[in-house]
Amino acid sequence: MTGTTLDDYTDRYARRVRGMTASEIRALFSVASRPEVVSLAGGAPYIAALPLDAVGEMLGQLAAEHGTTTLQYGIGQGLPELRERICEVMALSGIDASCGASPEDVVVTVGGQQALDLVARLFLDPGDVVLAEGPTYVGALGVFQSAQAQVVHVPMDDEGLIPEALEAAVADCARAGRRVKFLYTIPTYQNPAGVTLSEERRERVLDICEQAGLLVVEDDPYGQLGFESEAPRPLRARRRDGVFYLSTFSKTFAPGLRVGWILAPHAVRDKLVIASEAQILCPSGYAQAAVSTYLGTMPWREQLKVYREVYRERRDAMLTALADLMPAGTTWTRPAGGLFVWATLPEGLDSKAMMPRAIAARVAYVPGTGFYADGSGSNHMRLNFSFPAPERIREGVRRLAGVMDQDIAMRRVFGQVSQPGRRGQAGADAPGPDLA
Amino acid sequence: MTGTTLDDYTDRYARRVRGMTASEIRALFSVASRPEVVSLAGGAPYIAALPLDAVGEMLGQLAAEHGTTTLQYGIGQGLPELRERICEVMALSGIDASCGASPEDVVVTVGGQQALDLVARLFLDPGDVVLAEGPTYVGALGVFQSAQAQVVHVPMDDEGLIPEALEAAVADCARAGRRVKFLYTIPTYQNPAGVTLSEERRERVLDICEQAGLLVVEDDPYGQLGFESEAPRPLRARRRDGVFYLSTFSKTFAPGLRVGWILAPHAVRDKLVIASEAQILCPSGYAQAAVSTYLGTMPWREQLKVYREVYRERRDAMLTALADLMPAGTTWTRPAGGLFVWATLPEGLDSKAMMPRAIAARVAYVPGTGFYADGSGSNHMRLNFSFPAPERIREGVRRLAGVMDQDIAMRRVFGQVSQPGRRGQAGADAPGPDLA
């Protein structure tokens, strides 16, 4: 097969993949990882807060003393002892035996991403609708698009998803004859918006979905990273059936191990396992043993407190810097947990168009457009506070405010914002067009 | 949503998943893992041959000294240093820069399974045909079925895939108006057949696919586990375009880390990365660092020799035991590498029906039916020699021969084989119906 023929073959046959936004974000992260850039773009936990010597010792022993099992093949559903530990972790949030949570119904996955992909693979057919918060997790948009499903966004306010808007979306889809398969929601410390679905709305959202015959896919990577009062109990703690609960150890332990899970309704547990086996055969036995041993022998509850303290301090640094430095007309959410603040720009500013100027000013963020299936959101940006140190956060916000002030001034003078840098120029002062 | 409604929802919406064979094999492995059973059923490497203390020390250091990077998120394509090491590994087999192999075109995956799934996800639409050896890897059948593709098997002989049969299959599909997307092949030390595609047939197979405009998906997990002369060069070493080369560290290092890869034609590399990001976000940075450090600092070429020596001794033990003990009319392949022997039973014996009696006699294998999409293959079985020690292999073959002798005697007396044990009986003497 010649190169040309392969191109033809690819053009003819290769499935369309969500390209634009994902590759933009990759390019963004690549630029943002330069040391001179303050990156508020990532979503990385602050791994340096872990007791790395002790973790290293534990990991070494797992191979030296138990390598013949930990380094061997495992079973598709995941290690029984890890699934028991996962139930202990979920019980902290109120998902326990009283609401039917059992290690039998836990499926271990390659991070939260595979959990999402498995649910999508099991249920989504081309043309199906998924309801999701607007904005929502960019990786979920990738999964739904890969499944050729359509995302209908439901707006949020400071109390999270708006029940009336959810009802309206359900009704609109019904009227239009569109088949809605499930609601995908991150109810607690949402990514990217940083808001939390309030106690009373949780029941209403569940009722609406129940009445509409919709499954709920509850994604909860951040629920145990609250800074203030306890978070409202997860949706799964309130309903035994109809809710898939997805979570991960990426934010509470370490993303590099890629261990997440689904607590599935019993009726579909086996189907998820078989789908996962077709995808990856089995999750890493070594990574599973690492998480299981971490939870079984190390002070993980104390470590959660450490993460919460670190992130609270950084969130405070960000909120203070935003209040001190942002131009008038900018607003932002005040997250009670998690990793992100969602900012809304003064009228007329465009976070995506502004990105090259921000990088030139050595600060990075994710433009709001990444979090909407329809490319809207250009007057928003996501700001991460979990990874950079407090003084770097303030410096990043200072640089960002400077870029915004300039844009505002330019708008006043010219009525629109000019694009500095010419296509093809390279270097930190004029990043390539892939970020524009 | 009530339980009944969820069942309804699942019945209505959940995608059909390859259930029967996969769950049978799971049940089989569960029984086969009892210590009193000699399992010739698995496909596990002999991890105890690794220098586990040294591996443990290396893994511990990776977390203790480099945890802030190894335990953090990584990039979807995989670590650049690992992709360079992978090119060194492939160069051993003749896939090197001279045929266009480059770290740029390597995509790191969660074992060989995800590599297969990504290729399927990118190219297969429901109803498409995949050509594959008959028999072939059971996990590949799961992937293709999950993609709602049809597998058309192409027969093999002792020199592997029969080119004339491949031509005939291509022509048959063309005549029937069926769209064939690619040939999936394990040319070297095939799973489950243990045969190797001969030197001259490699060129013919490539020519046939080239003329038919078919991609080749070359799965090569075992190519470096040869016991005798060098294996013929991989297909990818002979063609720069049109061949996806898939492999894994599961057999040459450790399956518990779940690290495999695709060397992709450049034109589709990005699409594979984006598809993988939608599935798993990124492969485990820690596992990748482990493999990369193993390849960079430990004597992995020597370790390959150790594995080869161990497996050659075990293959010899199996071939000798088969020659000494198997009833007349039984035939088997003589693999020059890899992990498996493929046995053909005397006429009238059924390896699937015999399974409960084998388990009762404390020996396990995989019935041939697992390796055909159409459920044929009942007069075959796959026998693994990589994991059990030589004396266990001989004991397993002795037990298996005893069961076969009994079946043959019963057939002589009654004309058919009766099924011992009644449905519902439990225990090692009468295993449950899930294995029948």
Image: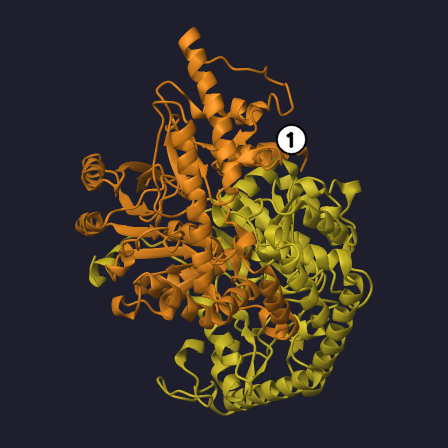
Chain colours: A yellow, B orange
In the figure, residue A62 lies in which quadrant? bottom right
Label 1 neighbour load within 10 Å: few <14, some 14-19, many 20+ = few
In what quadrant of the picture does the C terminus of chain A appear? bottom left
Q: Position of residue B350 (x, y in %)?
A: 42, 22
Q: Which residue: 55% across, 44% down? A: A181
Q: Position of residue B334 (x, y in %)?
A: 34, 39
**Residue situated in front as seen by the camera: A276 or B423:** B423
Q: Chain of mark 1?
A: B
Residue A194 position within the rendered picture, expressed as x and y whole percent measured from the top left: 67, 67
**Amino acid on which disc 1 is placed:** Thr
Specify the quadrant of the image occupied by residue B239.
bottom left
Q: Relative to residue B47, is residue A303 drawn left or right?
A: right
Residue B30 location, x and y as percent? Answer: 59, 36
- Relative to B198, is A18 on the left or the right? right
Q: Quadrant of the N terminus of chain A?
A: bottom left
Look at the picture and state if B404 lies above or below B110. Answer: above
Taking the spot 27% from the left edge, 38% from the top edge, the residue there is B156
Q: Is residue A351 visible?
A: yes
Residue occupying image coordinates x 71% and y 65%: A158
Residue for badge 1: B4
Q: Is residue B31 left or right of residue B291?
A: right
Element carrying mark 1: helix
Q: Residue at x 69, y 66 (%)?
A: A57
Label count reads 1
Q: Does residue B14 show up?
A: no
Q: Nearer the viewer, residue B374 or B224?
A: B224
